[in-house]
């Protein structure tokens, strides 16, 4: 059951507002307030952000916490994300994909929310990415093999962090680690932390707290100059080795 209906009702009454007065504050119809409080309708995310801002609480607490007289507000830095991304379009009104190259990764931590900084990033357009807001990030290291260092991950902006899906890959922007490309090992809503897992087993998983995260982007594709190589044809020598290994395995099983 969602906490949103009861939270709206509790916060509205605590502020001493009628449904009509609260609706006037938000610029919507009174009937919508009644529908939200009685769970007959769900407010859109933009309105949720507006309500959370009005009551001076984080959107994360507003969505996930059961707010009553005993509730204490959490850190505002742990919000799921309440800002609006700055975007640009090309001459044909197609939304651009901004590229964050390796050399710009450090600066991105300070400029990610600055429209002027984002406007200076390289841009391109790909027709297959139309629904959503996308950004491209150049990754480094070998933690996500077979994707090699220098691969560009194209990712879609994730507005609501509780939509993160386990075992899928994301670009995580955090205060301590900067820009990383990882697989998610848990559900964010349950622990308020994300377990980040590398596809390369040499690297140990680690956790990052919600208060440390700045942005989350869901991976949708990649661009790489590292082309796949075909699987070599089996030779007589390789087949002989495989047969010998199979015979040893069968022998071990029989002995056990």
Image: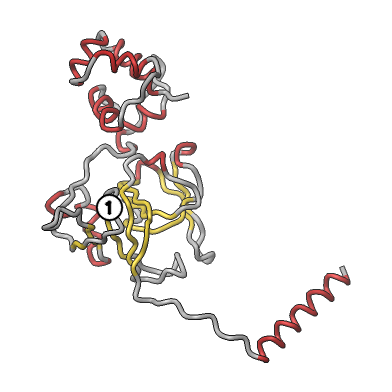
| Residue occupying the far right of the picture | 255
Residue displayed at 42% across by 44% down? 164
Residue displayed at 32% across by 59% down? 154
Q: In which quarter of the image is the C terminus?
A: bottom right
Q: In which quarter of the image is residue 150?
A: bottom left
Q: Is residue 93 above or below residue 244?
A: above
Is residue 217 shown left or right of residue 21? right
Circle 1 residues within 10 Å: few <14, some 14–19, many ≥20: few
Percent position of residue 67, x then y: 39, 20
Q: Count numbered badges in the picture.
A: 1
Percent position of residue 170, x then y: 39, 54
Q: Quadrant of residue 246?
A: bottom right
Q: How does the figure colour the protein chain or chains? A: secondary structure
Q: Quadrant of residue 58?
A: top left
Is residue 68 shown left or right of residue 11? right
Q: To which residue does mark 1 refer? A: 130
Residue displayed at 13% across by 59% down? 120
Q: Which of 114 and 126 is in front in this view?
A: 126
Q: Is residue 214 above or below residue 224?
A: above
Is residue 105 shown left or right of residue 140? left
Q: Which of 154 and 203 is in front in this view?
A: 154
Q: In this view, does 64 lie above or below 77?
A: above
Residue displayed at 16% across by 49% down? 114
Element under disc 1: loop
Q: In this view, does 216 lie above or below 44?
A: below
Percent position of residue 7, x then y: 37, 19
Percent position of residue 213, x then y: 34, 46
Q: Nearer the viewer, residue 97 or 56?
A: 97
Q: Which of 197 and 164 is in front in this view?
A: 164
């Amino acid at each position: 059951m969602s906490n949103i209906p009861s939270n709206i009702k509790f916060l509205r009454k605590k502020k001493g507002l009628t449904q009509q007065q609260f609706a006037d504050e938000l610029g919507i119809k009174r009937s919508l307030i009644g529908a939200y409080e009685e769970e007959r309708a769900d407010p859109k995310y933009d309105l949720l952000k507006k309500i959370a801002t009005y009551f001076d609480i984080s959107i994360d607490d507003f969505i996930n916490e059961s707010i009553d007289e005993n509730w204490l507000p959490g850190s505002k830095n742990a919000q799921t994300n309440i800002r609006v991304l700055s975007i640009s379009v090309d001459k044909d009104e197609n939304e651009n994909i901004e590229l964050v190259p390796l050399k710009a990764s450090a600066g991105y931590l300070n400029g990610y929310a600055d429209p002027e900084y984002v406007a200076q990033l390289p841009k391109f357009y790909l027709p297959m990415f139309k629904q959503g807001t996308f950004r491209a990030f150049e990754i480094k290291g070998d933690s996500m093999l077979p994707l090699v260092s220098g691969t560009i991950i194209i990712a879609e902006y994730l507005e609501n962090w509780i939509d993160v899906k386990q075992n899928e890959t994301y670009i995580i922007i955090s205060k301590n680690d900067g820009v990383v490309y990882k697989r998610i090992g848990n559900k964010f809503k349950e622990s308020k932390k994300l377990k980040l897992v590398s596809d390369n087993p040499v690297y140990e998983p680690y956790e990052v707290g919600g208060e440390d995260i700045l942005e989350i982007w869901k991976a949708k594709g990649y661009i790489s100059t590292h082309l796949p190589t075909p699987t070599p044809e089996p030779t007589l020598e390789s087949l002989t080795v495989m047969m010998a290994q199979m015979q040893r395995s069968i022998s071990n099983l029989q002995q056990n």
